[in-house]
């Protein structure tokens, strides 16, 4: 992500520099550096964590507290039912891998 991409991201969400800074947990001045692509004549690279945070904001993630805990319902399910779900999931993963291999081979 370059400075102009960062600025386009901010404007696409109709955020001020201050609002973007608050959403990303940054100072407004850092947002300005990212948009300009430099600080005191030196290039400024936008860190991966900030780029990922920009994406998360675009898809509607407000905050993240780690993976969800296993639901109580899942714990209470019959072992056979859970095993059947696991087999379905494995079958789908194998099918997806075959599709990807075929696509990569044709590319």
Image: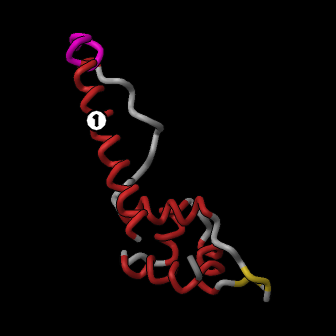
Considering the numbered disc 1 on the image, is that residue within a helix, a strand or a loop? helix
Colour mode? Answer: secondary structure
Q: Quadrant of the N terminus?
A: bottom right
Which range of residues does the magenta coloring cover? 74-81
Whole-percent x, y for residue 10 in the image: 45, 77
Horizontal side of residue 33 vs 25, given as left or right: right
The residue at 42%/63% (across/down) is 104
**Pick the front one: 103 or 90:** 103
The residue at 44%/64% (across/down) is 55
Disc 1: CA contacts within 10 A as few (<14), some (14-19) or many (>=20): few
73 is higher (above) or lower (below) than 78: below
The residue at 63%/86% (across/down) is 36
**Pick the front one: 54 or 31:** 54
54 is higher (above) or lower (below) than 89: below
Whole-percent x, y for residue 81 in the image: 20, 17
Q: Is residue 1 magenta?
A: no
Q: Which residue is mark 1?
A: 91
Horizontal side of residue 15 vs 79, given as left or right: right
């Amino acid at each position: 992500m370059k400075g102009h991409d960062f600025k386009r991201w901010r404007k696409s969400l109709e955020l001020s520099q201050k609002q973007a800074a608050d959403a990303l947990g940054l100072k407004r001045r850092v947002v300005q550096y990212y948009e300009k692509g430099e600080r005191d004549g030196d290039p400024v690279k936008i860190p991966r964590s900030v780029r990922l945070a920009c994406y998360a904001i675009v898809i509607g993630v407000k905050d993240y507290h780690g993976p969800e805990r296993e639901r109580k319902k899942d714990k209470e399910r019959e072992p056979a039912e859970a095993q059947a779900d696991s087999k379905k999931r494995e079958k789908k993963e194998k099918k997806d891998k075959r599709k990807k291999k075929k696509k990569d081979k044709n590319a």
